[in-house]
Image: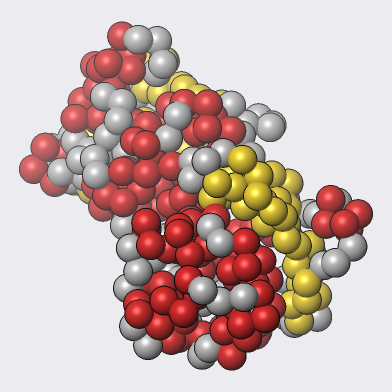
């Protein structure tokens, strides 16, 4: 299967398009999409006959490449709002229940979906083909999530790209530089929404899990510092983390007791900018986006030892 295999869709009627998406092996279909450039793909899915067949055809076959053990543990209704040039083109919904995936024909049930994933039609096709990562798309603003964010995360961990073991959303596999690039593309308003919603704990836990690997051992050598982080902007109390820097290495805990040389106070979306190299510690303090309680010199000394990814 090559990109030329999609050429038949240029003249296909609805019946032919339905048959194409129903009968083409999933791995072959993915290979064809991967080999097709954006402009050509947009032309094809811009045809009403093709678009009307493509999305329902793809959604109807999701269970072909699901991890069925994970699928059995997920239940809920998911709606996809697909746009082109910012305009809503169509909506589709699926129900996940008892290890099965089925389309939702009832408009009322679709309107009351547990989670709504909104993206462009082109991004949807690229996501399904494994060319884009849903987690990165969400961070950069290419994918919006409304409703049950943990259901969206669970759904992303259920489906695999045909011919691949890669799941759509797995924060532990995301490349830090790719995350940094995604954060750099996102607007402040979007990051604020992300860090105020259900993905917040996932993002924060992953950032702090990786933080020890960003320590510059040479700069940290000889330092003995304990720095706390108090991150606001969430639905409840601020999240608190403590980083101990000793013998050139860092350790992260959630313990809120004991010694603190300094505590960095900020909104979680500003911390995400800091942790991806888009907000310098000194600039953050000067601009009032980062506050420091305790010894500012020690807080800045700590920040100087961390080599955050910058994309």
Q: Position of residue 96 (x, y in %)?
A: 76, 72
Is residue 228 in sight in this rendering? Answer: no
Residue at position x 46%, y 50% in the image: 137
Q: Quadrant of residue 140?
A: top left
Residue sitting nearer the eye, 191 or 204: 191
Residue sitting nearer the eye, 21 or 30: 21
- How did the renderer colour the structure? secondary structure
Residue at position x 78%, y 72% in the image: 103
User: Residue pushed farthest left?
Assistant: 218
Q: Quadrant of residue 129?
A: bottom left
* Quarter of the figure that contains the N terminus: bottom left
| Left or right, 111 with reference to 52 | right
* Count of numbered marks: 0
Residue sitting nearer the eye, 309 or 113: 113
* Quarter of the figure that contains the C terminus: top left
Residue at position x 47%, y 26% in the image: 188
| Left or right, 110 with reference to 147 | right
Residue sitting nearer the eye, 51 or 297: 51
Q: Position of residue 167 (x, y in %)?
A: 49, 71
Residue at position x 37%, y 37% in the image: 185
Q: Is residue 297 above or below residue 186?
A: above
Q: Is residue 122 above or below residue 105?
A: above
Q: Position of residue 104 (x, y in %)?
A: 82, 67
Q: Position of residue 90 (x, y in %)?
A: 69, 53
Is residue 29 in sight in this rendering? Answer: yes
């Amino acid at each position: 299967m090559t990109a030329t295999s999609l050429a038949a869709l240029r003249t296909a009627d609805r019946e032919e398009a339905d048959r194409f998406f129903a009968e083409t092996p999933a791995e072959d279909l993915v290979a064809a999409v991967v080999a097709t450039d954006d402009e050509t793909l947009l032309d094809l899915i811009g045809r009403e006959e093709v678009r009307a067949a493509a999305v329902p055809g793809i959604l109807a076959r999701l269970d072909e490449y699901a991890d069925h053990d994970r699928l059995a543990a997920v239940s809920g209704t998911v709606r996809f709002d697909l746009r082109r040039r910012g305009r809503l083109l169509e909506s589709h919904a699926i129900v996940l229940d008892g290890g099965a995936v089925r389309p939702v024909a009832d408009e009322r049930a679709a309107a009351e979906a547990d989670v709504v994933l909104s993206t462009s039609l082109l991004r949807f096709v690229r996501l399904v083909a494994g060319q884009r990562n849903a987690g990165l798309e969400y961070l950069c603003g290419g994918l919006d999530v409304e409703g049950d964010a943990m259901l969206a995360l669970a759904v992303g961990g259920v489906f695999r790209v045909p011919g691949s073991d890669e799941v759509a959303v797995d924060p532990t596999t995301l490349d830090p530089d790719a995350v940094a690039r995604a954060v750099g593309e996102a607007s402040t308003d979007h990051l604020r929404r992300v860090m105020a919603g259900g993905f917040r704990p996932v993002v924060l836990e992953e950032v702090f899990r990786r933080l020890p690997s960003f320590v510059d051992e040479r700069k940290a050598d000889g330092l003995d510092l304990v720095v706390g982080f108090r991150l606001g902007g969430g639905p409840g109390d601020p999240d608190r983390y403590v980083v101990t820097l000793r013998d050139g290495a860092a350790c992260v805990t959630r313990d809120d007791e004991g010694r603190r040389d300094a505590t960095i106070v900020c909104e979680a979306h500003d911390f995400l900018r800091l942790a991806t190299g888009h907000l310098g510690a000194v600039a953050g303090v000067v601009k009032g986006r980062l506050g420091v309680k305790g010894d500012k010199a020690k807080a800045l000394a700590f920040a100087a030892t961390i080599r955050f990814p910058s994309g």
